[in-house]
Image (cartoon, rainbow, N blue to C red):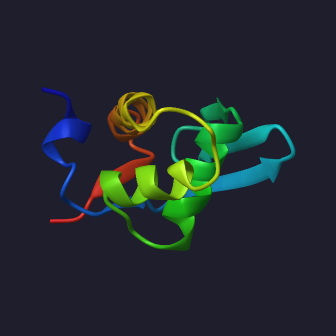
């Protein structure tokens, strides 16, 4: 089980010491602690902007994407779960206790 699956009912938020720039074709996220940058596609950018706006659960994020993108919900959930797992492992987001 991935970290995101374990945390699917917990609120996720952007970690401190992270900055992002949003572009027409996605977002660039910078970990200010390490200097590493991450490039997100359009969908990843929407996920990031949702987390910047307020902490959110996996289901809330999928709901927001489902309203915008014409993609099967199951695929959205799988893709978002993988993205959140990567972001969490990289220290860019964290689950609220």
- Can you give x and y, in whole percent of width and height, for residue 63 in the image? 44, 56
Q: Residue furthest bottom?
A: 54
Residue at 68% x, 53% y: name it.
20
Q: Residue furthest right?
A: 24
- Can you give x and y, in whole percent of width and height, for residue 61 in the image? 44, 55
Please, is residue 58 above or below residue 55 in the view?
A: above
- Can you give x and y, in whole percent of width and height, for residue 70 in the image? 62, 38
In this rendering, would 38 be left or right of 77? right
- Residue 53 in which image quadrant: bottom right
Q: Can the viewer see residue 32?
A: no
- Residue 9 in which image quadrant: bottom left
Instruction: Identify which residue, 13 or 71, lies in the foreground.
Output: 71
The quadrant of the image that shows the C terminus is: bottom left
Please, is residue 32 above or below residue 72 in the view?
A: below
The quadrant of the image that shows the N terminus is: top left
Residue at 46% x, 62% y: name it.
16
Instruction: Identify which residue, 65 or 38, lies in the foreground.
Output: 65
- Can you give x and y, in whole percent of width and height, for residue 39 in the image? 68, 31
Q: Can the viewer see residue 41?
A: yes
Residue at 38% x, 61% y: name it.
60
Residue at 63% x, 51% y: name it.
46
């Amino acid at each position: 089980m991935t970290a995101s699956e374990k945390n699917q009912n917990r609120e996720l938020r952007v970690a401190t010491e992270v900055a992002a720039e949003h572009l027409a074709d996605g977002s660039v996220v910078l970990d200010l602690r390490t200097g590493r940058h991450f490039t997100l596609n359009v969908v990843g950018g929407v996920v990031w902007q949702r987390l910047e706006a307020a902490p959110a659960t996996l289901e809330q994020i999928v709901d927001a994407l489902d309203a915008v993108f014409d993609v099967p919900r199951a695929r959205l959930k799988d893709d978002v779960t993988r993205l959140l797992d990567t972001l969490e492992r990289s220290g860019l987001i964290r689950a609220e206790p």
